[in-house]
Amino acid sequence: MNFETYPFEKLNQLLENVTPHSDYTALSLTIGEPQFKTPTFILDALNDASGLLNKYPKTAGETELREGMLTYNKKRFGLTLTNAQIIPTFGTREVLFNFPQFLLHDVKDPVMVFPNPFYQIYEGAAKACRAEVIYLNLNESNHFQPEVDEEALRRADFVILNSPNNPTSSVMCMADLKRWVELALKHDFVLLNDECYADLYLDEPLPSLLNASIEVGNESFKNVLVINSISKRSSAPGLRSGFIAGDAEILKDYMVYRTYVGCASPLPLQHAAAAAWSDQTHVDGFRAKYKKNFEVAKEILGVEAPEATFYIWLKVEDEIAFTTKLYREYNLKVIPGSFLGREGEGRGYVRLALVYEADKTKEALERIKLALEQS
C-alpha cells in the first residue's frame, strides 16, 4: 500500500538541515497531545487494577467500562444508549482505520468522503480500502464548514465528518448536523462524526451527531455513528480508550469483525478508563486551562478563540517558509497546514496546538508574534 508520509515525519524532513537558534529553549506546538498531568483518581484506578494483567480482556469490553461510557453519554449528551449501540475501542485511531475496511469490504468501487484538510488516518483508511475519495474542502470562503454536493453524495458509501474540527477548529451547528443525518438517510450512506474534541468547548456544550439524529426522528441511529475518546478530555492519551456508537445493526457485525482484529484494551487500562468516562468534573479544569490559553493567544496574536478544541489555525503568507523561520530563529515547531491537506487546501496556514500551561503557551506565542512582525 502506498501510504502518504505522516505530517510529523514531513516536518522532520523539512527541518532536518535547519539549525535552531540556541538562545531559545526548544518548544513544540505540533502534536495534539495534552501536556497536563493525568488526574490522580485515574492513576489510582490504574494502579488498583494492575494485578489484572494476568487475565485476557474481552474484545467487547468489560461491563465496568461499558457502563462508564454509557454514563458519559447520558450525562454529557442526554443519550440513553443500549449495549448494542456502543463498542469500546482501543482509542479512535484504530477504529478510524479498520472500520472503513470492515464497512466497505464487499462494496464494489467504494467511495469515501471526508473533510480536507484532515486527520491523516482518514486517508490511510481510504487507501487500505482502495476507495475513491471525495473531499469536503474546508477554507475561508466557506467558513471551514463542509459544503454539500448532493450529486457527489449520491455516490458516497461512507462519509466522515469531524466536528469540532482538527485542524481548523470549526464547529458544525445542530442545524447542519441534522441536515447531514437527513442526507445519510436520503442517499443511504453511512455517516460518522469524529467527536474527539466535543468536550473541549470553551463556553456552551456542543451536541453530538446522535443528538441530531434523534432530532430528525432517526432514533434508531440508522446509518449514523460517532466516535469519541478520553485522550483530549482527560489528558490521558496513553489509556487508548475510545468508543464507536450509533447504529446497532452496523455495530453488531462490526463487533464480530473486531474479535479478529486483536485490539482489546488491557484490563488495568479499562478499569482506569471507566473511572475517567464516569466523571465529568475533572474535564472542567482542563477546559479552563485551554480557555486561558486562548485568552493569551488573543492578547498576543489578536486571534479570536474558536468554539472548541485547543488549536489555532493561523493564517500566514507562506506556511513552509514561516515554519522554517520559526524553527531556525526561535527554536519553535509548528505544523504547516499544507501537510494536513490535499489539492492546495491548508496552504497559507499553520496549526498551533495550545496544549501547555499558560506560561509556556505565552512564551511560544510571543515567539510567533516576533516572527510575524518580521515577515
Image (cartoon, rainbow, N blue to C red):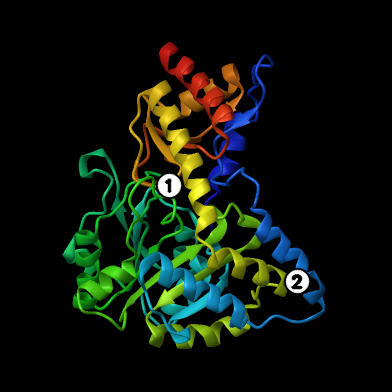
- Which residue carries the number 2 mark? 49
| Residue 233 visible, this orientation | no
User: Horizontally, is 255 left or right of 79 in the view?
Assistant: right
Q: Amino acid at mark 1?
A: Thr
Q: Earlier in the sequence, mark 1 or mark 2?
A: 2
Q: CA distance from mark 1 to mark 2?
A: 31 Å
* Element on which disc 2 rests: loop
Quadrant of the snapshot with the C terminus: top left
Q: Residue at x 31, y 51 (%)?
A: 171
Q: Vertical placement of 356 versus 359: above or below? A: below
Crowding at label 1, few (<14), some or many (≥20) Cα neighbours within 10 Å?
A: many
Residue with the most extreme top position? 374
Q: Residues within 10 Å of mark 2 (few under 14, many from 20)?
A: some
Regarding residue 113, the answer to whether it shows in the image is yes
**Measuring 70% from the left and 80% from the top, which residue is drawn there?**
57
Image quarter (top left, top right, bottom left or bottom right) of the N terminus: bottom right
Drawn side of residue 98 relative to residue 75, left or right: right
Residue 138 placement, left or right of 131: left
**Residue 16 drawn above or below residue 290:** above
Quarter of image, res 48: bottom right
- Residue at the far front in the pictured view: 281
Residue 128, percent across and down? 50, 67
Q: Residue at x 82, y 73 (%)?
A: 51
Q: Which residue is mark 1?
A: 309
Of marks 1 and 2, the one in the foreground: 2
Q: Which mark is residue 324?
A: none
